[in-house]
Image: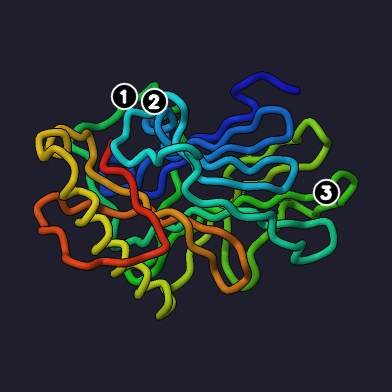
Amino acid sequence: MGKKEDTTLRVVVGTNGGPRSFVWRIWSTGSDVYVAVRNGAQDIKSSLHESGRYRHAFTSESNSPFVPVGDRAFFKWDRPPEFTSGVTMPFRIVVPVSELTTPPREPSDREKAKTTLLEPGPEDSASYITLIVTASGREVEGYPRPEGAASALLGSWALENRDHLWIVGHHQPLSIAQASQLEECRTLIRAGLAQVDPAAVEAAEQPRAVFYAFKEDDGVASLIDVAADPVSPRPEGQQSGNRSHGAVG
């Protein structure tokens, strides 16, 4: 395998000096791929194992009040089927443009130099950071591209088993289903933040949250990176199979 920096990508959706998403860290160890908020990897990470068993889970080091008793994984799923021969789309990060926020402090030039910036799309769209894996020996012209959308290759490298990981950015309008999911996100995030010390939320470098564990129509698991609203009251009787965690910068 190559050096650590050759198997790691930091990426953020937004504009230099303006509103943006969390900084996301995507890395691999052997042939396993991991995804986490850069400053939150010590608490939660998404693990895409070579075995085809995937999970969102709290780490053993996490001090979060949301850590479940026993199994630290709060959502598990299997690798989706190939959408074309030798090509799998295991995971997406979805960032609605309406949810970008401006952090109170700009990162250093050194940190910016390590981070890939994906410019956001139109106001009513969402930006996608999509992970694609091509099987060993599968030839690709350029890089795998989402159908019907302009895209950019954000990063790529070979895994230990000789499969290849591609990380591709593109934008598309929010669907009715996604808009509904976004509203559910906001409700659940307010509920979650009601259980957190308000001082901790106020002290967060960039109050945002992540809505984990939902699948698109094609069976690909996604998460949504959204703004957090720390002042909204907790709703009564909220029920959902999805989970939201975050409010860290």
Looking at the image, is mark 2 or mark 3 nearer the viewer?
A: 3
Q: Amino acid at mark 2?
A: Glu
Q: Amino acid at mark 1?
A: Ser
Please, what secondary structure does the residue beneath circle 2 have?
helix
Q: Nearer the viewer, residue 160 or 81?
A: 81
Which residue appears at 67% of the width and 57% of the height? 89
Q: Is residue 196 visible?
A: yes
Asked if disc 2 and disc 3 are in contact, CB closer than 8 Å, the reply is: no
Q: Amino acid at mark 3?
A: Ala
Left or right for 145, reference 91: right
Residue 2 vs 28, above or below: the answer is above
Q: Earlier in the sequence, mark 2 or mark 3?
A: 2
Q: Position of residue 92 (x, y in %)?
A: 54, 55
Please, what secondary structure does the residue beneath circle 1 have?
loop
Sort mark 2 into few (<14), some (14-19) or many (20+) by Cα contacts within 10 Å: few
Which residue appears at 58% of the width and 40% of the height? 47
Asked if disc 2 and disc 1 are in contact, CB closer than 8 Å, the reply is: yes
Q: Which residue is mark 1?
A: 108
Left or right for 194, reference 134: left
Q: Residue furthest bottom?
A: 176
Quadrant position of residue 169: bottom right
Numbered circle sitting on residue 230: none
Left or right for 98, reference 76: left
Numbered circle sitting on residue 135: 3
Q: Nearer the viewer, residue 108 or 245?
A: 245
Q: Give the alpha-carbon distance from disc 2 to disc 1, as whole Å.
A: 5 Å
Q: Which residue is mark 2?
A: 111
